[in-house]
Image (cartoon, rainbow, N blue to C red):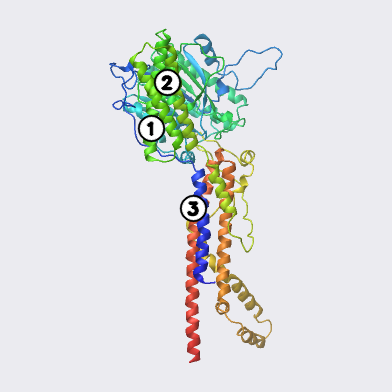
Amino acid sequence: MQKISVLLFLAWVCFLFYAGIALFTSGFLLTRLELTNHSSCQEPPGPGPLPWRSQGEPGACWMAARFSRVVLVLIDALRFDFAQPQRSHVPGEPSVSLPFLGKLGSLQRILEIQPHHARLYQSKADPPTTTMQRLKALTTGSLPTFIDAGSNFASYAIVEDNLIKQLTSAGRRVVFMGDDTWKDLFPGAFSQAFFFSSFNVRDLHTVDNGIMEHLYPTMDSGEWDVLIAHFLGVDHCGHKHGPHHPEMAKKLSQMDQVIQGIVERLENDTLLVVIGDHGMTKSGDHGGDSELEISAALFLYSPTALFLRAPPEEPEVVPQISLVPTLALLLGLPIPFGNIGEVMAELFSAVEDSQPHSSALAQATALYLNAQQVFRFLHTYSAAAQDLQVEEFHRLNNLFSKASADYLRLLQSPQGAEAALQTVITELQEFLRGVRAMCIESWARFSLVLLLCHGRQSLLGPSWPHRPSIPRVTSLSFQPSIGTQPSWDSQRVMAPLPGCLLCWWEPTPLPPTSSLQAVGCPLLLLWPFLCESQGSQKRRQPHGNEAEARVGPEEGEEEPLMEMRLRDAPHHFNVALLQLGLKYLFVLGIQILACALAASILRRHLMVWKVFAPKFIFEAMGFIVSSVGLFLGLALVMRVDGAVSSWLQQLVLAQQR
């Protein structure tokens, strides 16, 4: 076999692996182009006229502000059933007694006494349900991607348009207190800030007590327009004890007292928002997409009436990102450019006007502004990226055009029928929900076809001359959790992750070390000769007298040096190089395939983002570096082999002369 044939065949094998890695990466690693465009009051979201409610009002933006102040209380990991009102016990049914039930009694009392002033929603978060990703969603109205999830322990400033940026651009005074994750996400954005370290997840009180030290004095000072308080005690209690521990009851009772104190200090122009960024499992962890993890509480209250109707028996389910456009319009701000959430229409009812037509028109106006903003974002995004579904995009385009035409027609004759307004509202809601579903399908769903293609291509690789040894499996170990992120020990990780050992092989060396190993891999061909030579030397060592010692060299001179013995069969030498290269690539390929299988099976669990996906990326990069190093090593050995062959030929010719 010629040397060039060996290199070409190995290059073809590497190409197969590269293609498989590319297929899996494009189907698994969730990516989304982040646009840096920003909304502004000077640029309406669409070409149509401004809504009727903001016409001629001083300081009005897209819509006139309904509130001048907002208090946002973010209780980390506030699961929905933590805040759900408890129904009276039905005779004959067993009573339920759990530590976390019924501890937020102030919410239930407000809902009963002031049903038109408050509302409790079940807020659905998008996975991964990790704190940093939820904060981004709660301020931008967008969906998380792999890169976002992978950077959960390394927060960085948000570059997309967001509520905090809109508030500061409008000159609003934003005061923050609580989790220091916000400092990295919004550097320099707050007029006043009280950050507290979130590193120790076993500390239940430091952050919460620090917030309460500044919360009421700040509210009483009046030097704020938006006040954000991010409590961590409930989340830390879940990680340390779980939700079924008496400590959880104490933390929720403490939060209930905080909410009562805030409600007593609220003025008529202020909106209170109490929200959980995510839920938690029965063991107190979060990050995946189980029902308990994505189900969070959202409570809204104002001293002035907010709603025309009393709350329904069962709280309404709303996507978490719906809070972004809702707060933006309620505060008289532009909706962030990349938002794909839907406004909560009932908050825009004209409560002071009892006419149903006025309330329906106000809801349609808010939805129309929201739809214009989302439509503008879709067209801008589709011009910069090609990852949206073409057919669904055209369908939504036509739906928006029809809904816009119907809405503008109603503006020209505002005394139209109530049924026509409801039709427009339904069309706009269908458009907004269709856009969100399309974006989830494009950005937050895994391409199983590509994953299967990668697995099939890996399994249909070349046949191997010898079966390699199985790499040693090591135990899982994790660094302490940072901030509000979950922490696991090996038992709690292994329990919900069957088959995770598929990818956790002996850690691959760093790329420079891996490349050196690959370059030196062809030298393994010399190892048998070296061992044989050392064995021969040991056998020739003297054991008696000088005569025996003099015999050794004479016998050893009959054996040719190992460099000479390689020259006896140059064809076998090239075949041996090929086999060694294939074995080396096979071992690396098995590691990549194992990581890909584990990541595919567990593609919706947090550990994918924390362990398996980074492990796959590391193995893929290591394979690329190692394969290049292997080619360099083979080229070097072949170059030396050619030089030795040339030298031997010259030596033979010299002896013949």
Dot 2 crowding, Cα within 10 Å, few <14, some 14–19, many 20+: many
User: Residue 535 has which mark?
Assistant: none
In the picture, measured across the screen, residue 59 lies left or right of residue 458, that is left
Percent of width and height locating residue 262: 45, 17
Amino acid on which disc 3 is placed: Met
Numbered disc in front, either 3 or 2: 3
Residue positioned most to the top? 354
Could you tell me residue 441's position as x and y percent?
Answer: 50, 35
Q: Is the N terminus in the top left, top right, bottom left or bottom right quadrant? A: bottom right
Looking at the image, residue 308 sits to the left or right of residue 173; the answer is right
Which of pointers 1 and 2 indicates the residue nearer the eye? 1
Q: Amino acid at mark 1?
A: Phe
Q: Secondary structure at mark 1?
A: helix
Q: Looking at the image, is 198 positioned above or below residue 348?
A: below
- The residue carrying mark 3 is 621
Amino acid, disc 2: Val
**Closer-to-camera residue (400/146):** 400
State how far apart marks 1 and 3 are (Cα): 34 Å
Q: Is residue 649 visible?
A: yes
Could you give the CA–CA distance between mark 1 and mark 2, rounded to whole angstroms?
Answer: 29 Å
Q: Earlier in the sequence, mark 1 or mark 3?
A: 1
In the rendered image, which residue does mark 1 sit on?
Answer: 377
Earlier-in-chain disc, 3 versus 2: 2
Q: Nearer the viewer, residue 97 or 521?
A: 521
Q: Can the viewer see residue 227 in this picture? A: no
Say which element carries label 2: strand
Location of residue 402 (image quadrant): top left
Q: Position of residue 287 (x, y in %)?
A: 54, 35
Question: What residue did someone put label 2 on?
Answer: 71
628 up-or-down from 300: above or below: below
